[in-house]
Image: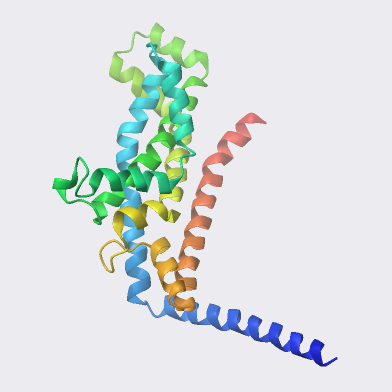
Amino acid sequence: SGSRRLRSRRTTERMDFLGKGLGQAIDLLLSGDPLVYDAAGKSLAVSAAAVALAALFGIPLGAVLARVAFPGRTLVVALARAGMSIPTVLIGLLGWGILSRRGPLGAWELLYTPTAIVAGEFFLSLPIIMTWTHEAIRKLDHRVFETATTLGLPFTSRWRLYLAETRVAISLAMLTAFARCFTELGIAMMLGGNIKERTRTLATATALETSRGEFERGLAMSLILVAMGLVITLGLGLLNAPQRSESR
């Protein structure tokens, strides 16, 4: 009976620890803790920049893969699909090798800067946007292509039509890419260096604060990550809703 009471007391203490940590984390969020919100701002900025750049290149490349036949196209598509599952640590490692002082771009002194994180997350986002754009255009109703050909639309108008017809799928791809960038740790840690008020993102700050014993601050940052995940999931659901209703 004594051991049972001891186990019960320990369980209660552990639950109290979690409960107090959650309460303190919410207090930090409500009080506008500068460390928490600076990391959140950095995460938003670098993720948005990376996805915007990836969309700028990935959407046209995906469209070309879908509509232009050339030698090696199947290999490029396969590589793009494989790139969607590449570990972020590997991207960070390769980026570190390229941007370090002994690397080919070491003279640019980009390592441990926000630009380095954006570059790494660009290569994380690019395969996602390329592949989803390729798949969306490839699966378009054949009548879209027939209409464009029959009307004799010029090159630019034809591509605008394809992209307009696949805007939902492309938006889904961009949201998915943003979610991966916003929550990833490997690239931000290896290329950004987790420098306070410069390259510290939510993911790297959460790992650091928790290792320091600042559980409540790490939990506060994790709550922002969870909230952003919920927002993105809701956005994906809203974008998917018209497609689900059309398929019924």
Name the quadrant of the C terminus. top right
Compared across the picture, whether 81 is left or right of 190 comes to: right
Residue 74 percent location from the top left of the image: 46, 17
Q: What residue lies at 42% left-to-right and 61% top-to-bottom?
A: 203
Residue 233 percent location from the top left of the image: 54, 51
Residue 220 percent location from the top left of the image: 47, 72
Q: Nearer the viewer, residue 134 or 114?
A: 114
Q: What residue lies at 50% left-to-right and 13% top-to-bottom?
A: 143
Q: Nearer the viewer, residue 141 or 72?
A: 72
Which residue lies most toward the right here? 1
Q: What residue lies at 48% left-to-right and 66% top-to-bottom?
A: 222
Q: How is the image coloured?
A: rainbow
Compared across the picture, whether 86 is left or right of 98 comes to: right
Quick check: 190 above or below 86?
Answer: below
Q: Nearer the viewer, residue 219 or 63?
A: 219
Which of the 4 quarters of the picture holds residue 190?
Answer: bottom left
Quick check: 91 above or below 56?
Answer: below
Quick check: 6 above or below 164?
Answer: below
